[in-house]
Image (cartoon, rainbow, N blue to C red):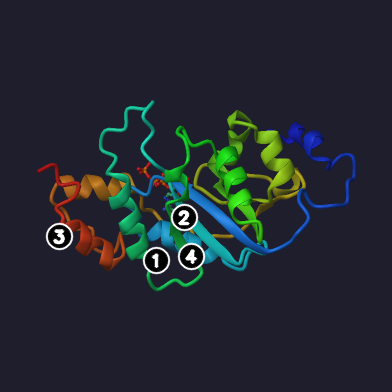
Amino acid sequence: MKPSSTTDTGQRRGRKTAPAARHGRLTGIFGGSFNPIHCGHVALAKALLGQAGIEEVWLMVSPHNPLKDERGLLDDHRRLEMARLALQNEPHIKASDFEMGLPTPSYTWNTLQALRHRYPDRQFALIIGSDNWLVFDKWYRHDDLVRQFPIVVYPRREAAIDPSQLPRGVTLVEAPLHDVSSTEVRRRLQTGQSISGLVPDAVAEYIQRNQLYSGK
Ligand code: ATP
């Protein structure tokens, strides 16, 4: 998002309060298609715990968008199952199907509103990569998102951000940069190569057992 957006957040006006008063456990929402979840996603979620006050991370597995051509996107329940397997030993990180019960397309604003309504004893923060922050002003109700939810930005390659330009309530955190993507995992599976080390073992076993992504 461009620095000029700071006017909308109150930073230039010197407002002292954070966008939302803190109450309840701060839960970071990390959305994606997770097709499939990989070690980069898990490492990132782990690194975020304890930063910017985040006590739990919920991976929001996005449902199929009927308005988009999403060939190659595995069924919702399979992607969710793999995310749950990947996180089975992480008590503070959960894979959530919450968005799957909401109308599509899933706008982040709508998801966060629904979460807030459903879990009034928690506070939610939005977790996004720096690449997404750079185009954040294209997001639906981006001003309201910045005003109403803490936003936690993690670094992505080729998307440098100047922390001094961030509006109040938006925090740049440290996180490892892992060279792995779901695209690469799928590509390897389609060409019969090993995915060892790219996804958690339980996910690799699930993929193998169910012959996923192989194009067979
Ligand atoms: P694809 O290759 O299918 O586009 P992906 O690997 O980028 O997928 P997504 O499901 O789109 O995975 O990921 C959700 C979020 O995880 C993205 O917004 C992205 O910023 C982040 N992410 C993806 N890969 C990594 C990684 N290696 N390290 C840190 N964050 C990642």
Which amino acid type is shown beneath numbered disc 1? Leu
Please report contact status of discs 3 and 1: CB closer than 8 Å, yes or no: no
Quadrant of the image containing the N terminus:
top right
Q: Are the residues at dot 2 and dot 4 in contact (C-beta closer than 8 Å)? A: yes
Q: Are marks 2 and 1 in contact (CB under 8 Å)?
A: yes
- The image's mark for residue 93 is 4
Task: Report whether 148 appears left or right of 34.
Answer: right
Checking the image for residue 59, the label placed there is 2
Q: Secondary structure at mark 3?
A: helix
Q: Is label 1 in a helix, a strand or a loop?
A: loop
Q: Kindly identify which residue carries mark 3.
A: 209
Q: Residue at x 56, y 47 (%)?
A: 128
10 Å crowding of disc 2: few (<14), some (14-19), many (20+) = many
x 74%, y 33%: residue: 5
Give the CA distance from mark 3 to mark 2: 24 Å
Estimate the spatial distance between the alpha carbons at disc 4 and disc 1, rounded to whole Å: 7 Å
Looking at the picture, which amino acid does disc 2 mark? Leu
SS label for mark 4: strand
Q: CA distance from mark 4 to mark 3?
A: 25 Å
Q: Considering only order in the chain, which callout, 3 or 4, is on the residue closer to the N terminus? A: 4
The mark found on residue 178 in the picture is none
